[in-house]
Image: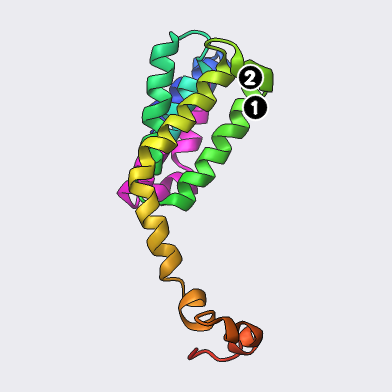
Amino acid sequence: VGFLFFLICKEVIKNTGWALFASLCFQLSLVTLYTLQTFPNTVIYACFLLACNAMWRLEEWSPKISICVLIFSFYSMLTTGHYVYAFYWGVLLAVLFIYRHGFHPLDLFKRFSPTQLFVLSAVIAIALSSVRMLPILEILGETNRTFGSVLYSHFMRFFVGVFFFIPEA
């Protein structure tokens, strides 16, 4: 994780000393210490940095390598099982992409533009991971306490406010 961030900082800052300092600060931060406690968070963290590296070098790398690395990163982030963290890191990747390349909707139709590669890789990764995500999301929707205990009947929806004050409900 620290080495990937060093490579990104070296590319952005263009100074090896400051890139090493930034990567050490990043490696010793509380977020890194928290994510290293569980394996899925470490995978999400490493895939986020790999996607950042690929996103930063979209113009330098060939389109096939860029899209393969981005699809692998997005897919790995989505299939770890931590959808909230994957969503958080995905939004951060989108913000970083807009910062680096800008978002021009007409570039979606230009062949091998950075916008097309980024959006296409995200859509392909979501489609590939939907095999695993959709059953989990369906089960989560069916087992929610609100749906199971409060809104089980159309006649009970009027009294939903009362159930918020009853902890056993």
Instruction: Single out the residue that lies furthest toward the left.
Output: 39
In the rendered structure, does residue 32 fall within the stretch colored magenta? yes
- Front-lying residue, 106 or 28: 106
Mark 1 sits on what residue?
98
Query: In screen coordinates, is 31 left or right of 103?
Result: left
Q: Residues within 10 Å of mark 2 (few under 14, many from 20)?
A: some
Q: Are marks 2 and 1 in contact (CB under 8 Å)?
A: yes
In the picture, residue 107 is in which quadrant? top right
Give the color scheme: rainbow, by chain, secondary structure or one colour: rainbow
* x and y percentages locating residue 45 in the rendered image: 42, 39
Q: What residue is at 48 percent from the left and 52 percent from the top? A: 84
Q: Nearer the viewer, residue 134 or 81?
A: 134
Tell me the magenta residue range.
Answer: 19-45
* Residue 59: in magenta span: no
Q: What amino acid does circle 2 point to?
A: His
- Quarter assignment of residue 139: bottom left
Q: Is 126 placed above or below 64 here? A: below
Task: Give the residue drawn at x 40%, y 31%.
Answer: 73
Location of residue 61 with respect to 28 vertically, above or below: above
